[in-house]
Amino acid sequence: MMYQIPMESLDRLLAAIAAQQKLYLPTDNTAGEAVYTEWTQGAALSKKLNTLRSAKDFFFPQIQNMAKFRREGKKIEVIDDRAEADDFCIFGVRACDVRSFDVLDNVFLADPVDTWYETRRKHATVISLACTRPGETCFCHTFGIDAAKAGGDIQCWETKDTFYLEPLTEKGQALADALIAADGELLTQCGADQEALVEKETERIHKILEKLPLYDLKAEDNRERELELFRSKKWKELSSHCLGCGACTFVCPTCQCFDIEDFNNGETVQRYRCWDSCMYHDFTLMAAGTPRLTQTERFRQRFMHKLVYYPKAHDGLFSCVGCGRCLRKCPIHMNIVKVMETLKEEKE
């Protein structure tokens, strides 16, 4: 079932959702970048194609407290200091970021389940938004993602004068039902004519995608070439200018590397985890040293994981969603597209 609301009433819709549960949406910050913020009256939905950092933050925060410890003599008290999670809604999530949740789920919801991640996932409702103007750095279609039908619990489209919503899951339908129960005039059920307009909008988006520079980029199934690619001499050339800054990993919606640290404040010890990066020289540092001594090895690890290791472990699902963030943020313009093209050329 599909619903519609006039674009001029979008603020009314956002206010109605916020009345049901906490609502987060992309808004423009002072630097002109789109970032997720909690909705307040008057907050405007960003017109940017995608957010600076992905919606991954909601389920796998950059910094997250895990537990506290208090020691008295030989006795150690373990304090579970996690906060109770409330229901919340993430609005305006693009198709690439919606797919990234599948990639993260395979990691954090596999046995043993990461309960911090699991709790936040259970309490979240994801409302996606079709990309009305896919950008030149977008290549989500390479991985079978449809920018015009973004998925999530509710998928949406925006046209010049109308906003359309289609619940896809029980959670999404429950939110739609709650909105209608609170205000029977908020959402109008779409008829065949309105659904045809939505289909026309998806076709328009698909035509834009066909004109993008990366439209012909193909994702090669390299699972059988694992050892060959690992030994490739191309990695040295590809990584020769890499700064090891980790920018690509911090904007990536599917990277899941983290470190766990303990901070002693004199009374208790706070254990927390924070994002880390396989591009850093100390990421694999152990008492005996590190197994990846050079930036070439670290560079190879990142892209082998995205394109070979992860697909091999998860039935061909790539650990890249084509969001284009790494293309836009890498200071030396090295990115996964160049790696894919280079490895493809080597195969040919």
Image (cartoon, helix red, strand yellow):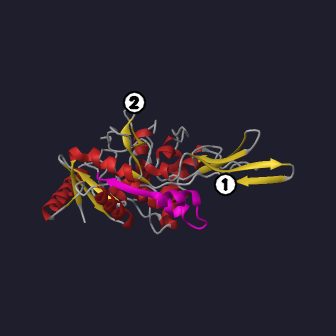
Residue 323 or residue 1, whichever sits in front: 1
Residue 253 rendering spot, x and y as whole percentages? 46, 50
- Whole-angstrom CA distance, mark 2 to mark 1, is 37 Å
Q: Are marks 2 and 1 in contact (CB under 8 Å)?
A: no
Please name the residue that numbered disc 2 is placed on: 30
Quarter of the image with the C terminus in it: bottom left
Residue 108 or residue 220, whichever sits in front: 108
Residue 184 rendering spot, x and y as whole percentages? 24, 58
Badge nearest the viewer, 2 or 1: 1
* Residue found farthest to the left: 193
Residue 296 rendering spot, x and y as whole percentages? 57, 46
Disc 2 packing (10 Å; few <14; some 14–19; many ≥20):
few
Residue 129 drawn in magenta: yes
211 left or right of 141? left
**Is label 1 in a helix, a strand or a loop?**
loop
* Residue found farthest to the top: 30
Q: Which residues are magenta?
A: 103-130
**Is label 2 in a helix, a strand or a loop?**
loop
Residue 260 drawn in magenta: no
- Please give the label number shown on residue 80: 1
Q: Residue at x 40, y 30 (%)?
A: 30
Q: Residue at x 53, y 42 (%)?
A: 246
* Residue type at tag 1: Asp
Q: Sequence order check: which comes first, mark 2 or mark 1? A: 2
Q: Is residue 92 visible?
A: no
Quarter of the image where one finds residue 179? bottom left
* Residue type at tag 2: Thr
Residue 182 or residue 115, whichever sits in front: 182
Q: Residue at x 80, y 53 (%)?
A: 76
Q: Is residue 58 above or below residue 224?
A: above
Quarter of the image where one finds residue 31? top left
